[in-house]
Amino acid sequence: MAEKFVVGFDGSDAAKRALDFAIQRAQVTGGALVLAHVLEWSPYSFLTPTEIEERHARRKEEMARAERAILTPAREQVTAAGVPVEAVIKYGHVAETLVKLVKAESAVQIILGRDGNSSFGSRVFGSVAGSLVQISPVPCTIVP
């Protein structure tokens, strides 16, 4: 069975660099990639039925847009490189959702890009990469 690498992918330049790195890694090892796009989504417990319906419609629109604009071009790039690929869109806290995906896929590594811009918010609230390296059950590669 080929090793699987989960790639956190949001379409940014940093994510594209991480994808290039992951493709090379998969080619060398004969592995496969799982492209994961995570949309932040916080549950609200006090919504009216109308608000729930509107929220559900927005969620479907966001997922379709992410599939079309972000995951499809990335999946095509990986396929063109001859690497087996799956793509998933999930809702939730990014680091926690990636960890759940790693466990579900029995992946051996998480690959993520970072842009190098450390804002005040990242220092106070933490970054995805920082959270991920603390909670991941597998090695994380953060591609600069």
Image: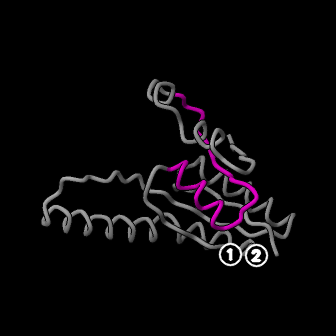
Badge 2 vs badge 1, beta-carbon distance below 8 Å:
yes
Nearer-the-camera pick, 116 or 44: 44
Q: Give residue 22's position: percent from left, percent from top.
A: 73, 58
Q: How crowded is mark 2: few (under 14 residues within 10 Å), some or many (20 or more)?
A: some
Quadrant where the N terminus is found in the figure: bottom right
Q: Give residue 110's position: percent from left, percent from top.
A: 68, 53
Residue at 39% in and 67% down: 63
Which quadrant holds residue 69? bottom left
Residue ID for mark 2: 82
Q: Which amino acid does label 2 sit on?
A: Gly
Residue 86 belongs to magenta span: no
Which quadrant holds residue 144? top right
Establish if 130 lies above or below 79: above
Residue ID for mark 1: 79
Nearer-the-camera pick, 60 or 104: 104
User: What are the residue bounds of the magenta stretch?
Assistant: 94-118
Q: Give residue 16's position: percent from left, percent from top.
A: 62, 54
Residue at 56% in and 62% down: 36
